[in-house]
Image: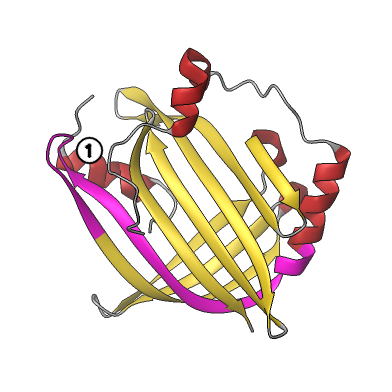
Amino acid sequence: MKYSSIQIASAVLLCVFTLPAFAEKCYEESPNMVADGDEYYDLVMKDKLSRKDDKKIKALTRSLKGKWRGKAIAVSCVGTEKNPKMKTIKSKVTASMVDGIENQLVLKAEMYMKSRKSTASTTTHLFRRDNMFNAVISDENFISYGERLRRRAGQGRQFIETTYALQLNTDNKKKKLDIKIHHYISGVLIAHEKWQLTKK
């Protein structure tokens, strides 16, 4: 499947705020799509969260609520599938996490981009219980999961997958949080991001 620069740019703008450049390759297939095959496009959740896992998420949510600051790296894919290029934006972050509806956690952030000398606001809703695929919850300090949806785009519809991984650590009595987010459209990577935050 090929994508033009305009299509990719439009898709990135429609996604949540985007971010970093690691070993990930632009337009590579989602690991979930590789593993699930045709079932990847099935939005019916097979495995619901257990009460034990739900309690772990609530415990992590309590730890995450409050004010944070740090940095973020945003990488979006531009160009064609045969000639992909990465556009990287680095930001300083001032953020807060508050309760949302239905046990969600809402991340509200102000991103200062030095290269552009501008600030952007972004809001991300975490832990949507009704749309959490492939959740991995090892303890009360780590969770990874994905979200999937179909969205109208022009005359057709796009299949969107977003994956999240959050790791909370305590260093010298300071809470530090790493967040990684990957954005896929039609099963290929179009953007990814990394946040490194310290609680105020």
Q: Position of residue 83 (x, y in %)?
A: 12, 40
Residue 161 seen from this side:
yes
Between 112 and 71, the residue placed more toward the observer is 71
Farthest residue in the top direction? 38
Q: Quadrant of residue 185?
A: top left
Looking at the picture, the colour scheme in use is secondary structure
Between 161 and 135, the residue placed more toward the observer is 135
The amino acid marked with disc number 1 is Gln
Answer with left or right where residue 95 lies relative to residue 130: left
Examine the rendered structure and indicate whether residue 13 appears above or below residue 187.
below
Q: What span is in magenta?
A: 62-87
Answer with left or right where residue 130 lies relative to residue 51: left
Examine the rendered structure and indicate whether residue 45 appears above or below residue 176.
above
Magenta stretch: includes residue 150: no
Name the residue at 29% across, 66% down: 89
Magenta stretch: includes residue 67: yes
Q: Count neighbours of disc 1 (C-alpha within 10 A) and say few if under 14, some if 14 to 19, many if 20 or more.
A: few
Provide the residue designation for mark 1.
Answer: 7
Q: Position of residue 91 (x, y in %)?
A: 37, 73
